[in-house]
């Protein structure tokens, strides 16, 4: 079977397990205060090119809860694209903290600076929630990629309107492969962002980068209270240490991106248009009969059953044989 289900259904990069074996008998302190996690922090800080607090969190949902709600007062809310991950894929986790997620309809998963500014300026005042956090993801939920100019423009609106910009970077590695951006770029144009590990070779976990001084203060109290602080968080730190010490993080994402280009180009040669395909998530329109045929040889997710839209995700383990196998099956 050619596997395009997602970019996290594997054990992680083998180099991480080799490192675990190397230190298997070592006693390690807990809760992210250990030497391994600090080495990982130093590697990430070098990439950022500036000071920041870095916390290692178990997964994407916990990271999003922590990052979006820590700086909020009870009457403040989060603004997201209608397709944002926090709106449909996290079981109302933000709302469960008592904060509303307000959405803007978009055609490509992206929020625009002008839309944010217009929305905030035209809120009804104290009879409504007050927008305080702008949530965007890089890449978006439909696989589109923000340019750094787009992110800079959003950040400038946030600065003007006294808002926090949070970038959900669950797939930020794939965005960097697609548009040649760097972690240091993101560190310039937001208040807080995550570096995804789960979807790019880590065993599990995300690195949350806190840039704004107001968000740094007492954050670890909130991290503990919300269940995001793990006794054995050194395992997340170890993943990030291995991924960043010799460039494996970038190599993994580059491989996934190259395979997505092979897939998109192959589909184009067959006369099949992609709905979205800028990154390692590729969406195409199909039909029930074709889906049934494709599922005999391929594994993928049906994004929209009603419209027969399927999602094909490449990752660092995707092979050329798998891509060509899918193209062959769709062409038969």
Image: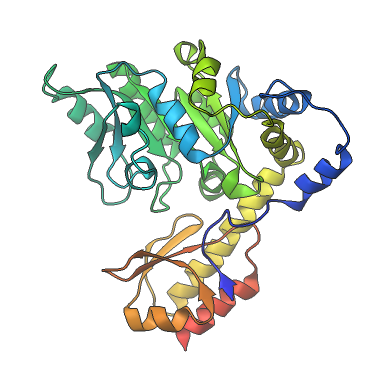
* Residue 182 appears in the rendering: yes
Kindly tell me whether residue 150 is visible in this rendering: no
> Is 63 rendered above or below residue 85?
above
| Residue 2 locus on image (x, y percent) | 58, 73
In the image, 271 versus 6, the foreground residue is 6
**Looking at this view, is 233 or 86 the one in front?**
233
Q: At which x and y percent is residue 309?
A: 34, 67
Query: Percent position (x, y) of residue 306?
Result: 26, 68
Q: How is the image coloured?
A: rainbow
Whether 101 is drawn above or below 163: the answer is below
Query: Does residue 12 appear left or right of residue 122 in this picture?
Result: right
Image position, residue 174 (x, y; %): 54, 48
Q: Quick check: 224 left or right of 277?
A: right
Q: Is residue 268 depicted above or below 43 in this figure?
A: below
- Horizontal side of 113 relative to 195 (left or right) equals left
Instruction: Please identify the quadrant where the N terminus is shown.
Output: bottom right
Q: Which of 279 and 192 is in front in this view?
A: 192
Residue in the foreground of this view, choosing between 303 and 179: 303
At x 51% / y 78%, what residue is drawn? Answer: 327
Residue at (62% x, 29% y) in the render:
230
Q: How many labels does the image show?
A: 0
Task: Report the residue at 44% width, 73% height from top.
Answer: 268
In the orientation shown, which residue stands out farthest toward the bottom? 332
């Amino acid at each position: 079977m050619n596997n395009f289900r997602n970019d996290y259904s594997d054990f992680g990069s083998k180099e991480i397990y080799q490192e675990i074996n190397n230190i298997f008998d070592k006693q390690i302190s807990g809760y992210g205060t250990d030497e391994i996690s600090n080495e990982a922090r130093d590697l990430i800080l070098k990439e950022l090119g500036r000071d920041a607090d870095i916390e290692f969190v178990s997964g994407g949902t916990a990271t999003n809860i922590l990052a979006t709600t820590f700086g909020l007062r009870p009457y403040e809310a989060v603004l997201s694209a209608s397709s944002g991950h926090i709106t449909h894929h996290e079981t109302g986790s933000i709302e469960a903290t008592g904060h509303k997620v307000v959405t803007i309809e978009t055609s490509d998963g992206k929020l625009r600076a002008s839309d944010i500014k217009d929305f905030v300026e035209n809120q009804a005042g104290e009879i409504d929630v007050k927008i305080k956090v702008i949530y965007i993801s890089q890449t978006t939920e439909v696989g589109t990629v923000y340019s750094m100019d787009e992110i800079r423009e959003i950040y400038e609106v946030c600065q003007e309107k006294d808002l926090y910009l949070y970038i959900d970077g669950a797939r930020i590695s794939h965005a960097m492969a697609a548009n040649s951006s760097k972690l240091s770029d993101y560190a310039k144009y937001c208040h807080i962002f995550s570096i995804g590990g789960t979807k790019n070779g880590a065993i599990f976990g995300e690195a949350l980068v806190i840039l704004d001084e107001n968000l740094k203060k007492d954050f670890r109290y909130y991290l503990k209270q919300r269940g995001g602080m793990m006794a054995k968080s050194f395992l997340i730190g170890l993943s990030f240490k291995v991924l960043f010490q010799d460039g494996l993080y970038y190599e993994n994402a580059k491989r996934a991106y190259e395979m997505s280009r092979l897939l998109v180009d192959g589909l184009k040669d067959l006369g099949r248009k992609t709905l979205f395909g800028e990154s390692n998530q590729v969406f195409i329109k199909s039909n029930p009969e074709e889906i049934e045929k494709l599922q005999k040889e391929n594994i993928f997710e049906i994004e929209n059953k009603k419209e027969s839209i399927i999602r094909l995700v490449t990752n660092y383990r995707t092979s050329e044989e798998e891509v060509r196998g899918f193209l062959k099956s769709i062409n038969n």
